[in-house]
Image: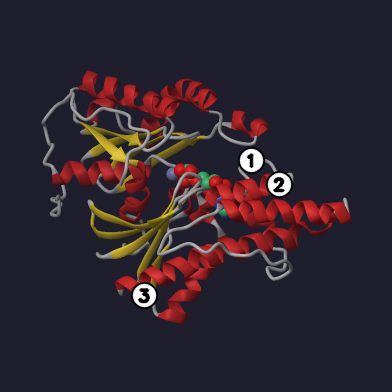
């Protein structure tokens, strides 16, 4: 595998991310972010979840202005680019295809290398973006990728050597947040709202049973059903139950989800003996999981890594850092455009 990274000087990489419902572009100078632009898609809110066809159409509308803005903010001309990195998967096929075709055409037009990036690997390697006052993890470390589409515990031995130790067998943790929020009548995506109200409530007010899943795997579909039954039971007794107790309900839901995540990561640390834990993906913006990890530093002697907020949810800077690491490792300098490896793969594995 690609272990030795030879840093290159002044490599400008344009990165494009379009795997789900955010159209994003970033420009990196080596491992530093010069610009990181994200256009969200408000269109899905009214449907309570991402509608694939609408996502694809919105990507088509957004991609040119978003890339243009990323280059403008970075003050970089497209002729100065050394390579283009793009998300090849996993994700929604129609969404991935927009970024893939755009990246391919531009790389072909500029005759520069096109670098395919795995979205999940990018959530993990986002920790290697150079940032002031941020110390990067050292190998090996454990990464917990927690988002709307994935929940995994990964052993990271090197930039490109990753082993999935456990993952969800049904819903992702982000879905557990979003679906619970939907039951409570909160708009999509409900994860950040549960977090907001949880800060004001009592986490022990209500008890939800935790799923029993073997090994380092997760399950969240039973949790969602537990929230639904709880809601139906309480609302039958008092129609104002949610309105009157929203903060406590959110705090209790968040507390349980964070415990489920922490139980598994503690188990992973115990089994591997690796005490470095990094998190990535949209749910790592959650204050509950952030606090729990910080507490674990003092309590268990772990070293934990929590990315800067803008690198937690989907963004293109994380695609750019993987592009840069691959560019350096594979010695792609002046190799021009190659038409290989340009497939969008919705089910791409780590
Ligand atoms: O990584 P991401 O932007 O997209 C995917 O690849 O899925 O993650 C989006 C997910 C959504 O489920 C959203 O509700 C959740 O991350 N999320 C949060 C918070 N911020 C975003 N969940 C809980 N607390 C938050 N503060
Ligand atoms: Zn993601």
Q: Between disc 1 and disc 2, whose residue precedes?
A: 2
How far, Cα to Cα, is label 1 from label 2? 11 Å
Q: Residue at x 54, y 24 (%)?
A: 54
Residue matched to label 3? 270
Would you say the residues marked 1 and 2 are in contact, meaning their CB atoms lie under 8 Å apart?
Answer: no
Query: Which of the two marks, 3 or 1, is nearer to us in this view?
Result: 3
Residue matched to label 2? 183
Q: Residue at x 30, y 71 (%)?
A: 272
Locate residue 15: give its quadrant.
top left
Residue 62 horizontal/vertical position (percent): 47, 25
Residue 33 horizontal/vertical position (percent): 35, 45
Report crowding for label 3: few under 14, some 14 to 19, many 20 or more residues within 10 A (C-alpha). Answer: few
Q: Is residue 47 visible?
A: yes
Q: Between disc 3 and disc 1, whose residue precedes?
A: 1
Report crowding for label 1: few under 14, some 14 to 19, many 20 or more residues within 10 A (C-alpha). Answer: many
Figure check: 228 above or below 112: below
Q: Which mark is residue 188?
A: 1
Q: Is residue 137 visible?
A: no
Q: Nearer the viewer, residue 6 or 94?
A: 94
In this image, 266 relative to 227: left or right?
left
If the picture is divided into quarters, which one holds ligand 2? top left
Q: Which mark is residue 155?
A: none
Q: Between disc 3 and disc 2, whose residue precedes?
A: 2
Report crowding for label 2: few under 14, some 14 to 19, many 20 or more residues within 10 A (C-alpha). Answer: some
């Amino acid at each position: 595998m690609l272990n030795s990274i030879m840093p290159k000087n002044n490599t400008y990489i344009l990165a494009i991310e379009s795997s789900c419902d955010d159209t994003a572009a970033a420009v990196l100078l080596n491992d530093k972010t010069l610009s990181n632009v994200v256009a969200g898609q408000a269109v899905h809110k009214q449907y309570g979840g991402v509608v694939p066809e609408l996502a694809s159409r919105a990507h088509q509308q957004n991609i040119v202005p978003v890339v243009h803005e990323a280059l403008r903010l970075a003050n970089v001309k497209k002729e100065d680019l050394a390579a283009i990195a793009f998300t090849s998967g996993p994700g929604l096929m129609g969404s991935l295809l927009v970024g893939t075709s755009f990246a391919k055409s531009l790389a072909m037009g500029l005759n520069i290398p096109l670098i395919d990036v795995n979205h999940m690997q990018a959530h993990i390697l986002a920790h290697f973006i150079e940032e002031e006052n941020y110390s990067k993890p050292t190998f090996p470390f454990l990464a917990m990728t927690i988002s709307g589409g994935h929940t995994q515990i990964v052993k990271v031995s090197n930039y490109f050597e990753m082993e999935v130790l456990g993952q969800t067998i049904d819903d992702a943790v982000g879905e557990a947040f979003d679906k619970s929020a939907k039951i409570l009548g909160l708009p999509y995506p409900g994860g950040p709202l549960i977090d907001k109200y949880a800060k004001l409530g009592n986490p022990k007010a209500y008890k939800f049973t935790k799923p029993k899943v073997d090994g380092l795997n997760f399950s969240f579909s039973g949790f969602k059903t537990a929230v639904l039954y709880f809601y139906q039971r309480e609302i039958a007794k008092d129609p104002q139950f949610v309105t009157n107790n929203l903060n406590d309900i959110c705090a209790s839901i968040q507390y349980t989800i964070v415990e489920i995540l922490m139980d598994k990561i503690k188990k992973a640390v115990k089994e591997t003996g690796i005490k470095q834990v990094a998190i990535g993906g949209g749910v790592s913006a959650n204050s509950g999981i952030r606090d729990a990890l910080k507490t674990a530093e003092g309590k268990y002697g772990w070293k934990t890594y929590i990315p800067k907020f803008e690198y937690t949810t989907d963004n293109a800077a994380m695609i750019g850092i993987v592009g840069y690491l691959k560019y350096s490792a594979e010695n792609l300098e002046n190799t021009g455009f190659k038409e290989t490896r340009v497939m969008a793969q919705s089910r791409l594995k780590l």
